[in-house]
Image: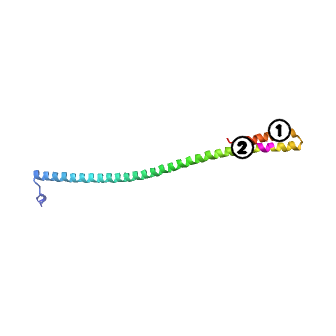
Amino acid sequence: MDLGADLVVPDRKTGLKSLRKRHRKCRSILRKQQRRKRLNNSNRRIMELKAEMEGISREQKRVKEGQEEVREKLIKLGAECDQLRKETEFIFKQRAETQLRLNLIFEILKAKKDCNPSKVTNLVMHLRELMRKQNEPQ
């Protein structure tokens, strides 16, 4: 049995060259496939990032609109607060003036009860002066 007889030995020069060429060609094809795969992965990731950025952009726009609404509401609340403060000050002023008039009226009644006409006259004059000042436009 001769094992070496079945084997075909390629020509040393042409056989090795063709093997090398095939090997280079396979490596080249493999590199191209790997490069395409990397590009596809990169392109896919870029598309994912673009979609994510668009989502973030829409979210930021909604946040900005919300902030503008809050800012407008705060401005309105500030104006309402100022108006309420003015109205409150006006009410306190009216209350103080009314309390002063009531005190004078009670003093007048007390002086009448005590039969003190000079005090009544003085208090009535003071009440009239106070009423005149309150009725004047400011």
The label number, if any, that marks residue 4 in the structure image: none
What is the basis of the colouring in this image? rainbow
Q: Which residues are magenta?
A: 100-104
Query: What SS does tag 2 mark?
Result: helix
The residue to which callout 2 is attached is 135
In percent of width and height, residue 15 lies at 12, 53
In the rendered structure, the answer to whether residue 34 lies left or right of residue 16 reads right
Which class describes the residues within 10 Å of circle 2: few (<14), some (14-19), or many (20+)?
few
Query: What SS does tag 1 mark?
Result: helix
In the rendered structure, the answer to whether residue 5 lies left or right of residue 32 reads left
In percent of width and height, residue 63 lies at 48, 50
**In which quadrant is the C terminus drawn?**
top right
Q: Toward the viewer: 135 or 49?
A: 135
The label number, if any, that marks residue 122 in the structure image: 1
Magenta span contains residue 136: no
In percent of width and height, residue 101 lies at 77, 43
- Under mark 1, the amino acid is Asn
Q: Toward the viewer: 94 or 40?
A: 94
Q: Residue at x 77, y 42 (%)?
A: 100
Q: Residue at x 47, y 52 (%)?
A: 62
Q: Residue at x 50, y 48 (%)?
A: 68
Tell me the chief SS of the magenta region: helix
**In which quadrant is the N terminus drawn?**
bottom left
In the rendered structure, the answer to whether residue 29 lies left or right of residue 63 reads left
- Under mark 2, the amino acid is Asn
Distance from Cα at disc 1 to Cα at disc 2: 20 Å
